[in-house]
Image (spheres, coloured by chain):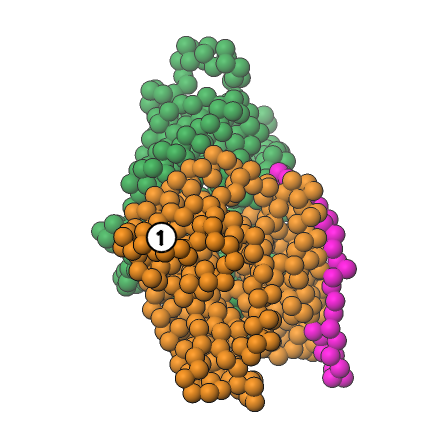
Chain colours: A green, B orange
Amino acid sequence: ALARRAAALMPSGGAILTLDTTLLTRVIQIDKVSMTARIEAGIYGPQLEEQLQAHGVTLAHYPQSFLYSTLGGWIAARGAGQQSNRYGKAEKWLVSAKLATPKGFWTTEATPASAAGPNLNQLVAGSEGTLGVIVEATVKIHDLPERKDYRGYLFKTFAQGIEAARRINHAEIPVAMVRLSDSPETYFFQALSSSGSGGLKSKLQRTYLKMKGFTDAPCLMLIGHEGTKETVIWAQEQTEAICRRLGALALGTGPGKRWFHGRFNGPAVRDPMMDRGLGVETLETSTRWSNIANLHEKVVEAISNAIAANVPEQNARGIVMAHVSHSYPDGASLYFTFVFPRQLDREVEQWQAIKRAASDTIEMNGGTITHHHGVGVDHAPWLGEEKGEIGMSILRATKREMDSKGVMNPGKVLG
Amino acid sequence: ALARRAAALMPSGGAILTLDTTLLTRVIQIDKVSMTARIEAGIYGPQLEEQLQAHGVTLAHYPQSFLYSTLGGWIAARGAGQQSNRYGKAEKWLVSAKLATPKGFWTTEATPASAAGPNLNQLVAGSEGTLGVIVEATVKIHDLPERKDYRGYLFKTFAQGIEAARRINHAEIPVAMVRLSDSPETYFFQALSSSGSGGLKSKLQRTYLKMKGFTDAPCLMLIGHEGTKETVIWAQEQTEAICRRLGALALGTGPGKRWFHGRFNGPAVRDPMMDRGLGVETLETSTRWSNIANLHEKVVEAISNAIAANVPEQNARGIVMAHVSHSYPDGASLYFTFVFPRQLDREVEQWQAIKRAASDTIEMNGGTITHHHGVGVDHAPWLGEEKGEIGMSILRATKREMDSKGVMNPGKVLG
């Protein structure tokens, strides 16, 4: 969380300075005609939405870390909110940024689209504090949605769910969120759910599903629509038709409401599990549609094998599950969650072994080392492979030009 | 046209080499699941579409220069096709590029979305040959649209037309093109049109328009929808409702068909006019919605004044007209066309005076110096103001890193 809201500075003396930006909390200007807002970048998610929503507008960037992360951090780490299909990943809603750099203040270009050379906003997004501290940003905002509609669909296979997500993207149907769990995740969250209504627990329900051709390992998809009443009604009909054509069972709004209610709770589930000797970790990537099923299979296998090779006692095993949560015309993200029995005498080595196995597999199979978590320290070893030697040399040259003394978050993404 | 398909190289000896890439014409791979294609970058528009459409897919990048420009040129100059609302400007449909650079071949990252540092594709788009020669690109493609629907609407004022374009964007209605002419352009193209049907020529039509509250200077909007039958039908109803609520008169599909038929003819109209002692020139910009009306007014005034100050004989005057042709959530482009009597003894100075007046006015009033024409030589004097000193220093550092001897299109956008 700290990395998301602050920038570490290291003066030549060698001391480490951590800069807290969280007093920069003003919404400076709202332009309701252009639907943009200029906002100081140290503001936390809830403060930002409170100020915008008082004017009837929203940025609607809701990462799971929403409560504890800032506007500047979202941009610096190229974050993604849960409704990124509608509201965009940070690099998409970013219009312009103002940075405090070793060379002075720098405000990037702010036009809607331009052919005046490369777009430098895309160099700021993902710079993770290495070029300067983001102190202000102009971002795209939206009217508060007139209507929200979140529904669940049950697919017989993960592949059919992926195909539905792909068709929804290619048909250009306005959608706020498409979230598909694989069968282990569908089972896991079903088992965790305390509410029985709308669930799949009863024997009667199981019998019904069996009749309909569902196995015991179906996959849950949640589809969210937000916007004007007219658009939401039309778009919901379109997405439901696509799901039904692929054999999905429409579960109605129950599962959607339950997910929406608990959407920031993930991290809070982790700590009690860790108290019980379990390790819980997540990692994520994205790839093109034609490679999603392959990458999912390979990474699940790599994590499972790495867990099996690093357990405290023979035959102990872990759980690996995944979901697709952000989708694009050319591909989608994959988000993996895994639970494993901790080796209490070598926890760090155990984690490193699993992380390395997953990351190597992602890189070898055409995924990005991170879709929205950022590079930081954990992903740095895999960055060079992804950007290439020439790409890395450009990033390093940019860093040298902006910060010749190397005081801005040294040694990170830009070298 | 040459600048769009080739890169000029200047070895240290001082000779100028022009590289012709137009034998690089292969479509290497089509991925119909991810809807991307990998294509050699020297290919001209018509060849590219012919090869893609044989497989039922399209890039649908149709700039006015479509017949004489190449894939690599579109990317290098951040071009925009006429249906950019649906198919995207070059920097949006670009997935990955392969460049021949002084450091060797460089292939940029290709994931759908990533947080693995800055996106270097956005440094390639707009580099205008200064970092290397684009030899190959992976681009987003679409199924050939099941249906196309192009219609005309007549607005009482330019401001109401702008408001319609803005609402269409903010309502997230899938649209391929929204093109709004100001009243001089509406009048000019009406006068040029040889076809009477569906026009506004007859006395009867004028009387009808007057009754409906239209003045003699209405503004024509063309709205194009492309996609699946279902989406086009729904979206067309939505855009028509927005236009009608703003007092527009629906003209049906006639004006749309006429525009579509003549969509690449603009430049061909220019030469006969020049033979008759007239000068014809275009320039373009983009800005946020809240500034469109102001920028339109200021640039029209600046061009008109510059023409008046540079005419061959007293009281000779020019025509200045404009349209909005590419729109985004936060703003839109403005494209100006002007016709003026040429000063045959000082044509270059006359053109420079008008160009300078327009460009200064654009920069002083929050527009970009170019939305899709690129920087080249003509716009270079205004680039520094737009990118800022720090932005320019990053562009120059990138250039030095990639091309230390300065052989790739020297002296252009990246210094």
Seen from the viewer's position, the closer of residues B129 and B358 is B358
Residue A242 in the image: state x and y as whole percent: 49, 29
- Three-letter amino acid code at the position of disc 1: Leu
Quadrant of the frame with the C terminus of chain B: bottom right
Seen from the viewer's position, the closer of residues A343 and A161 is A161
Residue B140 in the image: state x and y as whole percent: 59, 48
Quadrant of the frame with the N terminus of chain B: bottom right
Above or below, A8 relative to A82 = below
Above or below, B255 relative to A118 = above
Q: Which residue is mark 1?
A: B204
Boundaries of the magenta span: B8-34
Q: Is B284 on the left-hand or right-hand side of A298?
A: left
Q: Is residue A186 visible?
A: no
Q: Quadrant of residue A352?
A: top right
Q: Farthest residue toward the left?
A: A54
Q: Is B212 on the left-hand or right-hand side of A79?
A: left
- The chain that hosts pointer 1 is B
Q: Is A193 on the left-hand or right-hand side of B271?
A: left
Which residue is painted at 74% across and 55% down in the image? Answer: B25
Seen from the viewer's position, the closer of residues A271 and B390 is B390
Q: Farthest residue toward the bottom?
A: B345
Q: Quadrant of residue B119?
A: bottom right
Under circle 1, the secondary element is helix
Which residue is painted at 45% across and 76% down in the image? Answer: B318
Residue B342 in the image: state x and y as whole percent: 53, 82
Which residue is painted at 37% across and 76% down in the image? Answer: B301
Residue B347 in the image: state x and y as whole percent: 55, 85
* Residue B15: in magenta span: yes
Which residue is painted at 57% across and 69% down in the image? Answer: B270
